[in-house]
Image (cartoon, grey):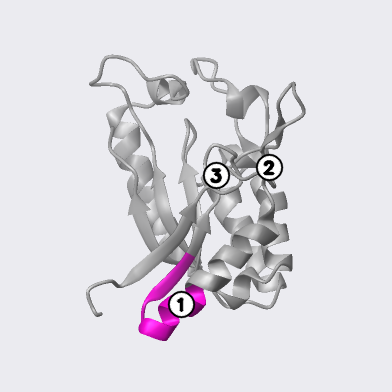
């Protein structure tokens, strides 16, 4: 009915822990799921916004046993577009966990922070570290493919452990962020997205 305004179809399907399929991480398989969902939902209520599943900003990763456990999000994004993504999405889902650099910094312009304990953006330059580079590239590739969809950023934010007892495994970058940086960067990101005019919806995820 009118109680559901939008549906995001899946989540971070370029990671095998999120998309567990005997066929592996095949973008065309995801787009087929999206197509079926889009057509079914629109038949019930054409006003419901269909958001494509947001990818995890990531480089590619192959396990020692040869299993591909992650596909670079830009590579997967291109494959989704090739498979017809833009025919079945009113808005294109996106995620970015801001790590320990600000939202206006592009991946190839990160200045070294010798005090940072999490070294990814500084010692291993890659587009996936950068909020700005990730969202700008998604928007550019939609436009190049002839689409007019905007981005729906269903997760973004800067975690901080300043008032907590350390960070869980995989979230060491949060140890570098102060609460003041969290506040500043969150507002900066919101202002950037508004100024770009390529983002429709944005959801903070989360404050801890």
Q: Residue at x 54, y 22 (%)?
A: 113
**Residue 56 numbered mark, or none:** 3
Q: Quadrant of residue 58?
A: top right
Name which of mark 1 and mark 2 comes first in the sequence.
Answer: 1
Q: Which residue is mark 2?
A: 71
Q: Which residue is mark 1?
A: 40
The spot of residue 160 in percent (x, y) is: 33, 28
**Camera-side residue of 49 and 174:** 49
Label 3 environment density (alpha carbons within 10 Å; few <14, some 14–19, many ≥20): many
Disc 3 on helix, strand or loop? loop
Q: Residue furthest right?
A: 66
Name which of mark 3 and mark 2 comes first in the sequence.
Answer: 3
- Location of the C terminus by quadrant is top left
Disc 1 on helix, strand or loop? helix
In three-dimensional space, the C-alpha distance between marks 1 and 2, rounded to whole angstroms, equals: 28 Å
Q: How many marks?
A: 3
Q: Residue at x 35, y 69 (%)?
A: 6
Residues in magenta? 38-51
**Camera-side residue of 39 and 183:** 39
The spot of residue 4 in percent (x, y) is: 28, 71
Q: Is residue 53 above or below residue 175?
A: below
Name which of mark 3 and mark 1 comes first in the sequence.
Answer: 1
Q: Residue at x 68, y 32 (%)?
A: 125
Label 2 environment density (alpha carbons within 10 Å; few <14, some 14–19, many ≥20): many
Q: Is residue 157 left or right of residue 3?
A: right
Q: Is residue 34 left or right of residue 1?
A: right
Q: Nearer the viewer, mark 1 or mark 2?
A: 1
Asked if the stretch drawn in magenta spans residue 49, the answer is: yes
């Amino acid at each position: 009915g009118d109680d559901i305004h939008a549906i995001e179809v899946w989540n971070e399907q370029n990671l095998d822990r999120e998309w567990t399929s005997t066929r592996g991480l095949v973008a065309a398989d995801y787009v087929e799921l999206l197509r079926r969902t889009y057509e079914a939902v629109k038949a019930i209520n054409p006003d419901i916004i269909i958001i494509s599943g947001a990818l995890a900003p990531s480089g590619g990763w192959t396990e020692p046993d040869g299993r591909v456990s992650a596909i670079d999000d830009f590579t997967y994004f291109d494959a989704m577009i090739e498979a017809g993504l833009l025919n079945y999405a009113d808005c294109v889902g996106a995620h970015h966990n801001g790590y320990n650099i600000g939202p206006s910094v592009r991946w190839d312009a990160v200045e070294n922070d010798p005090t940072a304990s999490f070294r990814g953006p500084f010692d291993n330059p890659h587009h996936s570290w950068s909020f700005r580079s990730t969202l700008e590239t998604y928007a550019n590739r939609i436009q190049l493919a002839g689409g007019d969809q905007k981005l729906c950023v269903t997760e973004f934010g800067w975690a901080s452990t300043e008032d907590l007892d350390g960070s869980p495994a995989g979230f060491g970058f949060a140890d570098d962020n102060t609460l003041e940086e969290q506040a500043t960067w969150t507002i900066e990101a919101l202002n950037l997205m508004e100024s770009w005019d390529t983002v429709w919806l944005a959801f903070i995820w989360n404050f801890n």
